[in-house]
Amino acid sequence: DFQTCLLASARALLPDGWDSKHESAWIAVWTCIADRLEQSLPLPSKYQKPVQNFVAGLSTDQRQKLGKRSFERLFREHEQVSNHFNQSWMRLAFIISKTLDMAVRLFHEPAQMFDELTQLGLKHIMFQADSQFFQPWVAALVAEIQLICQDEKVIDAMDFALCVIGSIIGKALEAGATPILKAIVTDDVKALKKALAATPRGQRAEAILGRG
């Protein structure tokens, strides 16, 4: 039983300090996690076909319009986000088109997509992106999808897939954007020296490579 194994491991980490309060807190956390998992586990099989059929039914022109309009909405509702984009509208539309394809692949190749999206999130460190940008980006895209599709099941399915994509990218960006990498990206020598000074000497090479 997974719950039992995790509980035993938690107890082993605090052999002297573990008490009834720890036990109650851990059980409460695990119950919350288990409830969320039970609700989420059926969703991939439920949403796979609606996502696949919706994306397959979009023409090249519809993809381009959806891409352009979703970014227009994002920039209109969150002006600060536009400061991080200098690509053409064609390039922004291409990003949305690729995202739609990722939404389909997410159901067929979940492990591979997780790795690819994680790498994509790490690349966004170089763009000085903020992990908080991805939630409004997903919301803008879903809002535009609602304007061209009235099928609630499709909208829910696309929202689910896009939220997973945005969450993986955002979490990878947040976890990988260490003070050292941020200083390197912004070419801030003072901040880099400060970050390196706070890192043990034997770990600095790994930290510079983003592994620390």
Image: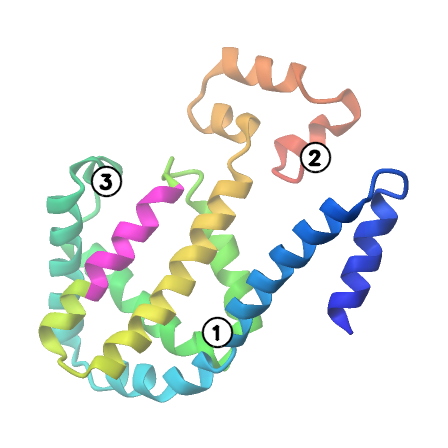
Instruction: Tell me, for residue 40, which label it has, or none.
Output: 1
Tell me the number on the disc at residue 20: none
Left or right of residue 27, residue 126 in this image: left
Image location (x, y in percent) of residue 81:
23, 40
Which of marks 1 and 3 precedes in the sequence?
1
Reply yes or no: does residue 132 show up in magenta: yes
Q: Position of residue 39 (x, y in %)?
A: 48, 75
The secondary element bearing badge 1 is classed as helix
In front: label 1 or label 2: 1
Residue 51 to residue 7: above or below: below
Q: Residues within 10 Å of mark 2 (few under 14, many from 20)?
A: few
Main secondary structure found in the magenta portion = helix
Query: 175 and 122: which one is in front?
Result: 175
Q: Which residue is mark 2?
A: 206
Amino acid type of the residue that numbered disc 3 sits on in the rendered structure: Val
Q: Which residues are magenta?
A: 131-142
The answer to which quarter of the image holds residue 124 is: top left
Number of residues whose C-alpha sits closer than 10 Å to that of mark 1, classed few (under 14), some (14–19) or many (20 or more): few
Q: How many marks?
A: 3
Foreground: disc 3 or disc 1: 1
